Amino acid sequence: MASVTFEKVVKKYNEETTILKGIDLTVKDGEFLVLVGPSGCGKSTLLRTLAGLETISDGAIKIGDQIVNNLAPKDRDIAMVFQSYALYPHMTVRENMAFALKMKKTDKAEIEKRVNEAAKMLDITHLLDRLPKQMSGGQRQRVAMGRAIVRNPKVFLFDEPLSNLDASLRTQMRVELKKLHERLKTTIIYVTHDQVEAMTLADRIVVLNQGIIQQVGTPAELFDTPQNVFVAGFIGSPSMNLLELGTKRDGNRLILSGENINVRVDAENDFNPEKIILGIRPQDFVFNEKEPEITGIVEIVEALGRMSLIHVSVSENVKITVEAEFEKARDFNIGDTIKLSLKHEKLHFFDSSTKTRLSSKIGNL
C-alpha cells in the first residue's frame, strides 16, 4: 500500500488549453478516494498522469515518498482498470489474468496461486477457462479487476469501470468494489461522473470542475456543507434547488424575496447583502396551505415508487423540484397551485457574487 500526493500539478496541451490548474491533493494510504465531476473537468487526465500515461507540465506526483514524474508506467507499481475491459479476445480468463505476471517472469506456482485467489475473491473461478466473448459485460469487468488484483500493486486506479453496465449490474458491482477494498485495504483512486456512485463508494470525494478542485471531503461533508454553488448543485440526487433572491432587513431578520417567494431568516445586524443564493434540497420542503413561503404551479409529477418528484414553476425564470411521499404527491395534478414552506434548519446560503458558502452570519444563529 502507499499514499499518493499531487503537488501543484499542471497539465497543458498548449498555451490555450490547460486541463489541470495546480492540483494539490494527498490520498491517504489505504483510502478509497473518488474523483467526480462533469465531462471535461480533468478527472481522467489526473488519473492518467498518476498512471504515467500523460506527462505533467509542472508540479510533482509522489507514490509513497518517491517522485514518479519521470518513471515509466510499468515502474510505478500501479494497476489500472479502464471503462473498456481491454481483455485479449484469444486468451482465456486465466491467461488474461496471468499475462502481466508472465511478462514479469513470475514463478508459475505463484502465478497460479494469485490467479486462483483473485478469481475466488471475485467469484469468477468457474469462468477461468472461458474466452471473453463467452461472458457477460459484468463478468468481463470482474476479469479486468482480477487482472489488476493479481499484480498486488501499491495503488489501484479505476477509470469509470461501471459506466458500460446496466443499472442493476452497476449496483451489484458497487457492492463488490466496496467489499474488495475492505479485503485488500489497498489505496484506490476511482474516477466517475456519477455522483451517486461517488457517494456510495468513497471514503472521501474530490469534486473537480474545469481543472480545479472545488471541495474535498467525506460524502456526508459534501452533502451537508457544500462549500460553493457548484458542489451544492452537483452533489445530491435530485440536485439542490438554488434560488438567487433579493434581501431586505427586518430587525434581526433578513427577508429573502423573489416572485412568489418570501423567506425570513435570522441574520447578524451587520449582514445586509443585496442578493443571496438560497439552497434547498428537494426533500426539505413542507406543504403549507396557511403560511407558505413559496407558491408555484405544478408542471409535472414523477412517480418513483415510494417517493415522487414534483416539478414546480415558481415564476417564468424560477423552477424548483420538490420531493414528496407518493401518497401526498397524488394530491397534485399538472396546473395545480402548490404552497410550500421550508425546513429552516436545512437551508444553505451562498454569496451571490463569489458563489461560496456563507458563514454563520445567516441562518440558525
Image: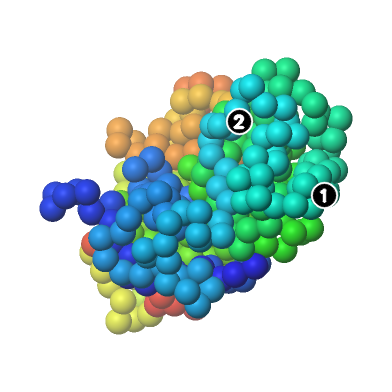
Q: Coloured how?
A: rainbow
- Asked which quadrant contains residue 352, the reply is bottom left
Q: CA distance from mark 2 to mark 1?
A: 23 Å
> In front: 300, or 120?
120
Please name the residue shown 74% across and 59% down the image: 184
Please name the residue shown 70% across and 41% down the image: 98
Can you tell which mark lies on residue 315? none
Residue assigned mark 1: 109
Q: Secondary structure at mark 1?
A: helix
> Crowding near pointer 2: few (<14 within 10 Å), some, many (20+)?
many
- Asked which quadrant contains residue 38, the reply is top left
> In front: 189, or 94?
94
| Horizontal side, residue 67 vs residue 109: left or right | left
Mark yes or no: residue 168 visible. no
Locate residue 257, reporting x and y percent. 33, 54
Q: Give the quadrant of the N terminus.
A: bottom right
Locate residue 108, reporting x and y percent. 77, 47
> Crowding near pointer 1: few (<14 within 10 Å), some, many (20+)?
few
